[in-house]
Image (tube, grey):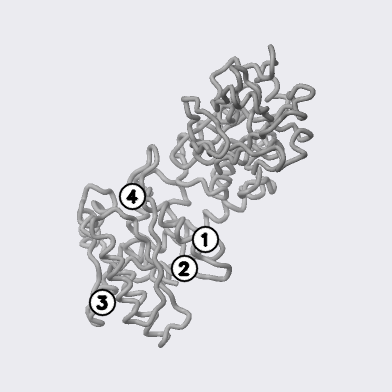
Amino acid sequence: MVAYSGGLDSSVLLHALAALEPGAQRLGALHVNHQLHPDADRWQAHCAAACRALGVAFQSVTVDARPRRRESPEAAARRARYAAFAAALQPGDTLLLAHHADDQLETLLLNLLRGSGSRGLAGMPVSRPLGDGRLHRPLLRWPRAALQAYARDAGLAWIEDPSNAATTADRNHLRHAVMPALRERWPDVAERAGRAAAQLEEDAGLLAELAGLDLGGAAIHPPGTAVLPMARLAALSPARRSNALRAALRARGLEPLPSGRRLREFARQLVEARDDRGVELQWAGGVLRREGLRVWLLDALPPPPQTPVSLRPGVDHADACGRVWLSPVADAPGAAAEGACLLSAAELAAGVTLEYRRGGERLGRGRGRRLTPLLQARRVPGWLRPRLPLVRAAGQLVGVAGCHPRLNPPGLEDVAAWRVCWRPAPALLPGLVGHVGEGDL
């Protein structure tokens, strides 16, 4: 399958492959519509028509490419695009991208200017796993000029994205203002850069092997616990500790990575901070947080809502932390034994609200018990506690959705009519392993 934008490069790759395999029974094209340009739908139609003319199976996917906090528009589009690529691949599939030697040179220079290490300076790998399949770049040894000559000879029509001419973007500035001067002085600059990238890719592979030894098979792949043992990290030298963290973040899919400076500072604080002090690093790709003897690798965490909302039967409440609803106890007769948060019909009639922690809460009917020690006893991580939905009935805090201390008073199960259920946001799942009540997920 070819990643087909409709531009020059992917048009050449698709046309060449279709010519190699008449009928193109096994060849397909995937177009990603980023919805970032007024002509995006017209470009998609162009790609569909070109595939029909070649007899190639065509599919398209529309993505949300809006930037996250501290994320550039280009990085957001790339993140959304590669997520779509990964989702489209089945086991055994290969996705072909049309990056060429000039793209590789631009990537190497950009990463050099960003202060990247050997992994970034290795540029784009020829092949790597992606989703359930693989990504492959068959044109990395060919310069853009060769693709342009092929397109002219074949009489191809392609899309010119006007944003590629805007030199406000770093890559475009390199392409239009820097690369011509480099080629004038060193005509084979792309070939030289390719050789350097190949050597650095080998070096990066050795660092990845070292990180694997240092991590010792820690559970870092979703949907694992996303936790690294602090004792293992503390035993490493500063350089190896940073390298291990970097490899773990890549394995967890938390990219783009934080800058090397910020990651090294986090690695330093890991071993210098007291055991009872939390150490945290947030960036556009995710969160690293140390709590006690564990280091959490997390997706970007949603902020907890600030405004309480009313809970009513038949009306689901969805927010950044998940979805909460009321389920009849009759549908789950074992709910009381599981320690679920139960509500009587009288409490529901008096009004039940959903809120999030502000500090100093006490859980239970009557005077209740302080919430913080209860959550600590259940080893609920500190980063998760502000994002657990709290249930308040008749002015009192009576339950925590998804993490249920057994504080229902005697006899409540005999009159309980409703059970509070919660489906947490995906980013919260790592911290809920072992804490979520049966039937809540």
Residue drawn 33% across the image and 49% down it: 74
Q: Which label's residue is closer to the chain start, 4 or 2?
A: 4
Image point 41% across, 63% down: which residue?
195
Q: Which residue is mark 3?
A: 151
Marks 4 and 3 close (CB-CB < 8 Å)? no
Farthest residue to the top: give it. Answer: 367
Can you say which quadrant of the picture contains the N terminus? Answer: bottom left
Residue at image mark 2: 95
Query: Which image quarter: residue 149?
Result: bottom left
Q: Is residue 396 visible?
A: yes
Query: Mark 4 packing: few (<14 Cα in 10 Å), some, or many (20+)?
Result: some
Q: How many marks?
A: 4
Q: CA distance from mark 3 to mark 2?
A: 21 Å
Report the side of 158 relative to 334 (left or right). Answer: left
Q: Residue 161 location, x and y as percent?
A: 24, 60
Q: Amino acid at mark 4?
A: Glu
Q: Earlier in the sequence, mark 1 or mark 4?
A: 4
Residue at image x 76%, y 40%? Answer: 333
Determine which residue is flagged by label 4: 74
Position above or below: 342 against 98: above
User: Residue 299 at x, y = what percent?
Assistant: 52, 41
Q: Is residue 33 above or below residue 353?
A: below
Residue at x 48% of width, y 47% of height: 255
* Earlier sequence position, callout 1 versus callout 3: 1
Look at label 3 and name its amino acid.
Answer: Ala
Give the residue pinned by disc 1: 130
Q: Is 107 on the left or on the right of 150, as rendered? A: right
Q: CA distance from mark 4 to mark 2?
A: 21 Å
Residue 182 to residue 440: above or below: below
- Mark 2 lies on a secondary structure that is strand
